[in-house]
Image (tube, grey):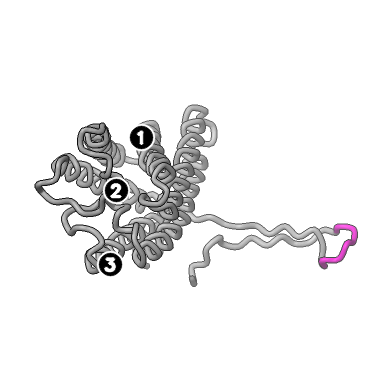
Amino acid sequence: MWWFQQGLSFLPSAVVIWTAAAFIFSYIMAITLHHVDPALPYISDTGTVAPEKCLFGAMLNIATVLCIATIYVRYKQVHALNPEESRIIKLNKAGLVLGLLSCFGLSVVANFQKTAFFVVHVCGAVLTFGMGSLYMFVQTILSYQMQPKIHGKQVFWIRLLVVIWCGVSAFSMLTCSSLLHSGNFGTDIIQKLHWNPEDRGYVLHMIITAAEWSMSFSFFGFFLTYIRDFQKISLRVEANLHGLTLYDTAPCPVNNERTRLLSRDL
């Protein structure tokens, strides 16, 4: 049995591979069509102009569904492993909410381009990166609470390092972004897709884009830490029939069917 066939370990793998593919394919298309500069464009800029924005939006919408599934499975796993730990249960619920908000923000980013709906796009980015960072932080705390009883200490330390990586990237991006958009570098930078080294604010722009890509890769790294955990879990769905037909008759007892949520044959 291959590693991705064990439990639901394919879910976090699919999130990373599919989302990275969305970034890479839209980047290649945008570069080929000369819509953005090759040197570290904003991730959103690679999905701003047609036709790459169509691919960018469609693939990120699928990535959103995969993220929701992964976050939900993680929630169910932590809950099953700690059914009576009130502190862990509360943190686990908070993590679920933060993760779902981050997924909603990702869908907003995918469907509302920066040049057309700047405010909505920025709100989506704040939800994606902000709530996503908090989600990673909460999950790291959960890892600390569950070690060494549930898993080894190395899992906690790896996730802590990834969270620090994400925090440094977020701080750099926020600091330089506030300076770039302070009004001292012009008002057209919001719609700007092409930057030259002699442009005012070019250095800040490059730091921001590098931090944005770095933060995205920290998210990938964090989801990859779920692979081993997800090898130890599978979900089942139960169908409860209220009768032997679909007519409006009195309910009668029937046998319930319990099947795997995702078939191994799939």
Read off the magenta span. 245-251
What SS does tag 2 mark? Answer: helix
Dot 1 or dot 3, earlier in sequence:
3
Tell me where residue 13 sits by quadrant.
bottom left
Please identify the quadrant where the N terminus is shown: bottom left
Mark 1 in CB contact with mark 3 (< 8 angstroms): no
Q: Residues within 10 Å of mark 3 (few under 14, many from 20)?
A: some
Q: Please tell me which residue is depicted at 41% across the width and 59% down the height of the picture.
A: 57
Q: Please tell me which residue is depicted at 26% across the width and 44% down the height of the picture.
A: 189
Could you say which disc has been placed on residue 29 in the image? 3
| In this view, 105 is above or below 14 | above
Q: Please tell me which residue is depicted at 48% across the width and 51% down the height of the picture.
A: 68
The rendered magenta stretch, by its main secondary structure, is classed as loop
Tag 1: amino acid:
Phe
- What residue sits right under mark 2 in the picture? 216
Could you say which disc has been placed on residue 137 in the image? 1
